[in-house]
Image (tube, rainbow, N blue to C red):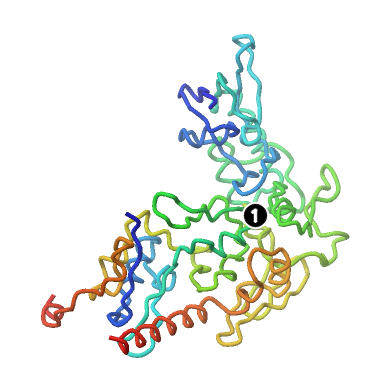
Amino acid sequence: MKMIYKVSVERCIACGKCELACAFAHGTEGKPAVSRINITRRGPELGTPVICYQCDTAACAAICPTQALVRNLETGAIDMDRARCISCRMCVAACPFGNMLWDETYHCVQKCDLCGGDPQCVPFCPTGAIAWVPADMAAIPPEVLDRETLAVG
Amino acid sequence: MPTLIIDGKKVVAAEGSTILEAARTAGVDIPTLCHHDGLEPWGGCRLCIVDLWQPGWDEDWFKLVTSCNHPAEDGMRIFTKSQRVVETRGVVLDLLLARCPDAPLIQDLAAEYGIEETTYAPREEPDDCILCALCTRVCDHLDIAAISTVNRGAGKEVAPPFHEAPPDCIGCLACAEVCPTGCIPYETSNVRRSIWGKDFEMLRDPATGQAVITKAQAEFFAGRGGVPGEYFETSDTSKRREMAKKFVSLQILEQGQS
């Protein structure tokens, strides 16, 4: 079964744990600035996590002059072959959703690779705003959160 | 699929692959300087040489070949660490060290082969360019060809035509980024970028002021097709903000319906 990200915007409390988890999973410094998942904050404790959609016809892969961005048939992600990348940054400019990121710290392009099929940001989300679910379950509304349990846990 | 033996290991290589690719899939390390997976093999640095034996040759006959551009064939026997290979790589690194005595990459590689100081006369005014031509090849690969190697022999160098600001350069920085010794100087900010003596205006997002590519780069890639030019106009931050706004409005719509 194909797995996809399910984002429930109303649940995001903009805590930034997903960004930290991503930064630690893909770098050594754990800087949220170099995270591949980004929370757009629209007020205190209100945010929207935005992450690569792994588009079927992806602009990043179409523009890449060295075919460094190719679909991984196992995970469904568009993976970046760093050995092929020439750092022209065209994918960063071409992505219509802003999910290709130029990382000045590591001097490379950051791109969500679904952590090889097991996204590390998902288990860290305290409210279940991001979930990793089979594609046919994405339309089902999430379970109602028990505020008491959440506050204690 | 060709089956070959690399350092005593049996390796099944993919059809049409080179000896270097076969060795890397088998986990055998071969040092390279001018090789880049995204570009055509070139065989310029001569560091990836290996000893090759092919069926039909005398048992004691071996040939030194560059593994990056030599196709892997059935029955080949490859030796990547034979005495002859190590000695020849040593000479190559000794010469490179005479050319670029200050490049840490060359110093480290040479030290691995036991060379601390060059035995040749060092260049009088050394720079870090090892003439691997990755910069010119990446520029050619993009169909820009703004820079090339000029002159021959000891006077060979990488330069734009007539050492003037190259008219074809789009300021993509790919040449500077692929340079293994990082010897191509450039300056970049959200406003201006300069490389090879040419100044570029950046394509800035009107909302955030962010910029990752130059205007010339956007025009060039829009002309190549594949992706509509208007995709380039805003920065990744404002595109994400747009998407977040859309998500929120969709959610409000959904709650209004239920």
Q: Can you give x and y, in whole percent of width and height, for residue B239 in the image?
A: 51, 79
Tell me where residue B83 sits by quadrant.
top right
- At which x and y percent is residue B123? 75, 47
Q: How crowded is mark 1: few (under 14 residues within 10 Å), some or many (20 or more)?
A: many
For the C terminus of chain B, the image quarter is: bottom left
Which quadrant of the structure image shows residue B182? bottom right
Look at mark 1 in the image and give the residue it sits on: B179
Query: Who's the residue at 40% across and 49% down the image?
Result: A74
Q: Residue furthest top?
A: B58
Query: Toward the viewer: A56 or B137?
Result: A56
Q: Nearer the viewer, residue A110 or B162?
A: A110
Q: Mark 1 lies on which chain?
A: B
Answer above or below: position of B140 versus B49. Answer: below
Q: Between residues B111 and B200, which one lies in front from this camera angle?
A: B200
Amino acid marked by disc 1: Cys
Residue for point 38% across, 61% down: A28
Q: Residue furthest right?
A: B162
